[in-house]
Image: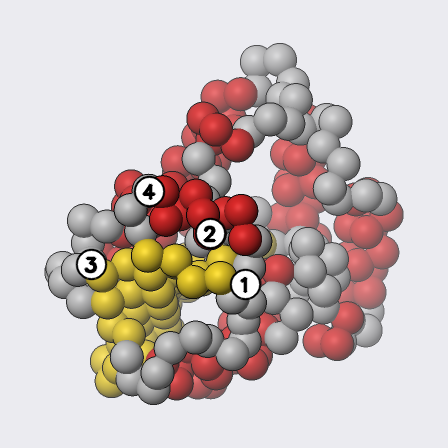
Amino acid sequence: MALDPDTHDTTPIADKTEYIYDWYENSRMTELTTLIDEVHHGGGRVASVGCGDGYFEEKYLSDRFDEVIGVEIVEDRVREVRERGIEAIHSGVPPMPFADNSLNAVVSLSAIEHFPDERGYIEEVIRCLKPGGHFFLNFPIEVGIGGFIRFLGKNIIHPEKKDTPNSWKRFTDYTWEELLKKTTRDKHGTNHRYYNYKFVIQDLDELFSEFVIRPWPVRFLGSLNIAFFARASL
């Protein structure tokens, strides 16, 4: 999910860190479109699932695809997407609101970690993609050093943000469980709670014929980052 920072960022930001927030928003969108541009050279039909207010779709996808369709569960955001001139469907996933083999690409920017049935969603993406289609996405690193960096970033840049309660306890408890290999997939939940990126990596590697993954923002640091960006192709 991407929101226009000029209209949606109402959360207090610590002094002198707003530039970090702006870099984060723009950098992740650029990283995802880099993965797109490596294999897609224009035209086709793309669905952006968890599209937020349509900012990313309007600014980054509309000039890369002939048809862009946003899918968003929040009704007010669906209206905003349509106001930008982007087609939008009010729906949760799975299932995907598309016919079999009807899409050239599916995009999920900062969205898959919010879906309760992650595996079911990936299977629906495959059903809707045409042969040779691509799935572009990113997902957070919530454990270990990468998770600690994310925790610091959230609490320094947005010290008054309340949408991730008990974030320190969540980080320490989950990291400890992950180190002990006790975290099972059924502990997954929305809003990043108990999100383990290893499951989605296994799914993408198993279900697609080609799978590319890139740590972000500093690629050579591997899992000592805050997120992974990926492209999976049929």
Residue type (three-letter) at the residue carrying disc 3: Phe
Label located before the other in sequence (4 or 3): 3
Judging depth in this view, the residue of 102 and 132 nearest the camera is: 102
Residue type (three-letter) at the residue carrying disc 1: Ile
Dot 4: element: loop
Label located before the other in sequence (4 or 1): 4
Label located before the other in sequence (1 or 3): 3
Label located before the other in sequence (4 or 2): 2
The percent position of residue 153, horizontal first and vertical second, equals 64, 34
Residue 217 visible in image: no
Dot 1: element: helix
Residue type (three-letter) at the residue carrying disc 4: Arg
Characterize the local packing of mark 3: few (<14), some (14-19) or many (20 or more) Cα atoms within 10 angstroms: some
Q: State how far apart marks 1 and 3 are (Cα).
A: 22 Å
Q: State how far apart marks 2 and 3 are (Cα).
A: 20 Å
Dot 3: element: loop
**In the image, which disc is placed on residue 84?**
4
Label located before the other in sequence (2 or 1): 2
Residue type (three-letter) at the residue carrying disc 2: Val
Q: What residue would you read off at disc 3?
A: 65
Q: State how far apart marks 4 and 3 are (Cα).
A: 16 Å
Q: What residue would you read off at disc 2?
A: 78
Which residue is drawn at the image coordinates 52% and 32% (left, top)? 8
